[in-house]
Image (cartoon, grey):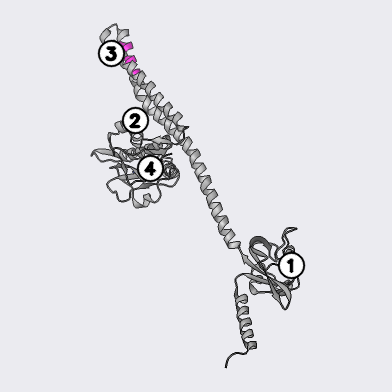
Amino acid sequence: MPASPDDAALQQAARCKAIVDNAVEAIITMDENGIVTHVNPATTAIFGYPPGELIGSSIALLIPAPPGEELEHSIQSYLETGTDTPVISRRELSGRSTDGARIAVELTLVAIRVDGTREFTAILRDLSERKLAEDLIRQRDQQTLRTREHLARLDRLYISAEMSTGIAHELNQPLTTIALYAQACRRLIENGAGDPAVELQALDRIEKSARQAGEIIREFRGLVSRHKAGHEQVDINRLIENCPTLIEHDLLSRNISLKLELAPNLPSVHVIQVQIQQVVLYLLRNASDALASETGTGPKWIVIRSERLSDLWLRVAVRDNGPGISNALAARIFQPFFTTKKNGMGMGLAISQTIIGDHGGELRLNEDYRAGAEFYFTLPIRTA
Ligand code: ADP
């Protein structure tokens, strides 16, 4: 037997009630004055008020909008214009729960006509969780920014500390030569046994070493002034070729040979030259330190290789035949302040990763290479 119109209406009402009762949004009906006439269970779940306290009260109890923006005001202006569109659509507002706490909600307010009178239904979605997630993301972004600024500050400090160490290292050799030859000259003159040819030779060495010292200072000065520079088009092979001079002394004294395998005709990259140079230096210095810790007597070597990976990327790798890096260590070496060295700061790889990341590339340890360690970084091929 087909359902009577009354039955059909009852069924429809039961369906609507089931939807309203089980909705996760608060659904509240009001009269033309914003007085609450019905609430669903989600309203109590979100705002904490029992239905009895809400029915008969103004909606302003839940949404204390600033003056001029009250819902009653919106309802009033709707009544004046009489359009059928939602009175308010998905507006973010601040609600208030029974304990006075603020709740972020999204409000949609629609008008309906029942038996010739207008009613309003407010649908309120609780945004607290979304806001919480957004806050967490914002906090994490701020934390990342702070870490970056911290790293950049340390980077500047560290670069100047590294430079002073580098200058001291490099100047040591010519200064020692100057002191030794000057001493020898003095002895020859004091003993009266001087041979002008020998003395001239010693003075020659002194002059050469003094010039070498001047050269070193000029080179470091150039590096410092370049440090202030911004991005520029750089020939990556030229940049790599200039790096070893800054740790030449270390490599020589540790008996480490350095080989450059640079791909010809690489396109230039748009980078802050001194920063990328600093990364190559960190990687070189790490490789040199790792090799110095090796007790074996075999040859010790480092290879720097440049290559074009694709139309978009260049790759630079620094490989050594030192002790390598265990899986357990590999998980930690990029963390700031992680070091296994007695006098290490543990900042080299962290700073390098930040620098390469800022240039749009990636710095990684090649975990497939097991005969030592290989670090590589990529840089985008891009002009200004
Ligand atoms: P630091 O050099 O001050 O220790 P880094 O961040 O540059 O700081 O390096 C962190 C750690 O990574 C080093 O202490 C070392 O244990 C490891 N490491 C880096 N490069 C190499 C390498 N080429 N071979 C072996 N271990 C390495």
Residue drawn where x is 35% and y is 52% of the image: 327
First in sequence: mark 1 vs mark 3: 1
Specify the amino acid type for callout 3.
Gln
Q: Main secondary structure of the magenta part?
A: helix
Specify the amino acid type for callout 4.
Ile
Q: Is residue 277 magenta?
A: no
Q: Indicate yes or no: mark 1 CB to ligand 1 under 8 Å.
A: no
First in sequence: mark 2 vs mark 3: 3
First in sequence: mark 2 vs mark 1: 1
Residue drawn where x is 56% and y is 52% of the image: 139
Q: Which residue is nearer to you in this view: 105 or 193?
A: 105
The residue mark sitting in front, 4 or 2, is 4
Helix, strand or loop under label 3: helix
In the displayed structure, 171 sits above or below 47; it is above
Dot 4 crowding, Cα within 10 Å, few <14, some 14–19, many 20+:
some
Is residue 343 visible in this depiction of the protein?
no
Q: Indicate yes or no: mark 4 CB to ligand 1 under 8 Å.
A: no
Q: What separation in Å lies between label 2 and label 1 (alpha carbons)?
A: 82 Å
> Which quarter shows the N terminus?
bottom right
Q: What separation in Å lies between label 4 and label 3 (alpha carbons)?
A: 51 Å
Q: Which mark is residue 245?
A: 2
Q: What separation in Å lies between label 4 and label 1 (alpha carbons)?
A: 62 Å
Q: Which residue is nearer to you in this view: 373 or 232?
A: 232
Where residue 92 sits, quadrant-wise, is: bottom right
Q: Report which residue position mark 1 lands on.
A: 79
Query: Is residue 230 toward the left or the right of residue 88 in the image?
Result: left
Return the x and y of residue 110 as percentages of the image width and height: 67, 69
Q: What separation in Å lies between label 1 and label 3 (alpha carbons)?
A: 107 Å
Q: Report which residue position mark 4 lands on.
A: 381
Read off the magenta span. Answer: 178-187
